[in-house]
Image (cartoon, rainbow, N blue to C red):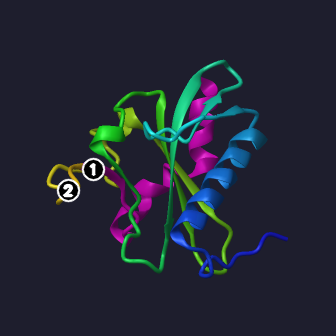
Amino acid sequence: MLRTSYAHLNTIQKGCFAEAYSKMAFTLEGFEVYDSEYDDRGIDFVCRSPGGVFYSVQVKATDTTSNQTNPFIFESKFQKTSDFLMCAVRLAEGFRPSIYLARGSDWGGTSECLGFNANGGNSGAYYEMRFAKRYADSIELHTFADYIHRLRAV
């Protein structure tokens, strides 16, 4: 049985766990998963759908206990294309991890849970996935179980 306690993990460990967990989720859905040699361009891995479409995937771990519960990608590492995926792995104490997916091209669409902060502070602008209760209906469209079918169908 998978442990569902994450409080003892540091930020790096949570990120590594989220990346491994998401790779396994894609593999179980019939995708081929390829590691990137370096993570200097904001791509954690590449996956190939059963239909032959390749996706560049950036994984972000988030939890419900820290100040930063909305995963984000800086504008310099983000691609607003249909083959770029943001994969957010949400870690909540006592529960299995939840995975949420969005294509780069989804930003600017109708999903309220996908935001762009042009005034991102000292580090610059960023794209984010919002988990506040007011975005609950919107974020449900991006759960792994629902979204993976859209990626497989292409």
Q: Quadrant of the C terminus?
A: top right
Residue 77 vs residue 21, the one in the foreground: 77
140 in the magenta segment = yes
Q: Main secondary structure of the magenta part?
A: helix
The residue range painted magenta reads: 126-154
Q: Total label count? A: 2
The label shown at residue 126 is 1
Quick check: 17 left or right of 110? right
For label 2, count other residues whose C-alpha is less than 10 Å away and answer few (under 14), some (14-19) or many (20+).
few
Q: Residue at x 21, y 49 (%)?
A: 125
Q: Earlier in the sequence, mark 2 or mark 1?
A: 2
Residue 66 placement (x, y as % from top left): 43, 78
**What kind of element bears circle 2?**
loop
Q: Quadrant of the N terminus?
A: bottom right
Residue 123 vs residue 89, the one in the foreground: 123
Quick check: 129 left or right of 23? left
Q: CA distance from mark 2 to mark 1?
A: 6 Å
Could you tell me if residue 4 is visible in this image? yes
C-beta proximity under 8 Å, tags 2 and 1: yes
Quick check: 47 left or right of 70? right
**What kind of element bears circle 1?**
strand
What residue is disc 2 on? 120
Q: Residue at x 34, y 32 (%)?
A: 80
Q: Disc 1 residue type?
A: Tyr
